[in-house]
Image (cartoon, rainbow, N blue to C red):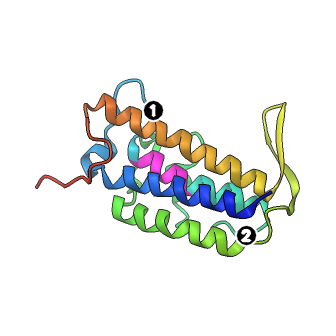
Amino acid sequence: MREHMVFQQMEFIRLRTLAALDATTEQQADDMPSGFRNSIRWNLGHILLSQENILFSFAGENVRKSLPPEYGELFGFNTSPETWNGLTPPSLKELREKLEEQPRRVKEVFSGRLDEVGEKPFVLGEHTSFTTLGEVLSFANWHEGLHQGTITSIKRVQGIESLWEKAEEKV
């Protein structure tokens, strides 16, 4: 697997996620239009947590040292802002800082290791499993793009025409 290409894709995809975040106000981030079970803030946090969980746990690395423990309750699989029950989600600024930092750390930890086989396969359904870090990182890249699409869909339903123009909070 060409390591440079996979990391380049990760960095480009993350730049697009950060651009979507920068084009979102705090108010827009928490809106859950009809037909959606999560908000833009949830999707951003889920991207962050999922990449962390998928890559670091697959490689047997410590997952929780870089994210606050409550992120699992906020952004994990089968969570929603409706299940937050008094938890305070991070601001967009905090999410941005963590999303911006993560690719550098992923590259630092996993450079030269993308052909490494995990202790057990990462299984998705009965027909798909990934065995190397490179395969898992490629899946994580796809997964992030999937959630970018959801963010775009939420914005379209909110009536936002300019999806990438830097947002300014109305005070």
Q: Earlier in the sequence, mark 2 or mark 1?
A: 1
Q: Residue at x 30, y 50 (%)?
A: 23
**Can residue 84 be seen here?**
no
- The picture places residue 170, in percent across and down from the top left corner, at 13, 52
Q: Determine whether the residue tagged by mark 1 lies in a helix, strand or loop.
A: loop
**What segment is highlighted magenta in the picture?**
41-48
Residue 36 vs 41, above or below: the answer is above
For residue 42, side relative to residue 3 (left or right):
left
Image quadrant for the N terminus?
A: bottom right
Q: From the image, tell me which residue sits under label 1.
A: 37
Predominant SS of the magenta segment: helix
Place residue 60 in its image quadrant. bottom right
Quadrant in which residue 35 is drawn: top left
Q: Identify the residue shown where x is 27% and y is 49%.
A: 165
Left or right of 92 on screen, residue 42? right
Please say whether residue 62 is visible from this viewpoint: yes
Q: Classify residue 11 as left or right of residue 164.
A: right
What numbered label is drawn on residue 110? Answer: 2
Residue type beneath disc 1: Arg
Left/right placement of residue 128 relative to residue 158 reads right
Q: Position of residue 21 (x, y in %)?
A: 37, 53
Determine whether the residue tagged by mark 2 lies in a helix, strand or loop: helix
Q: Quadrant of the C terminus?
A: bottom left
Determine the residue located farthest toward the top in the rendered image: 35
Depth check, mark 2 against mark 1: the one in front is 2
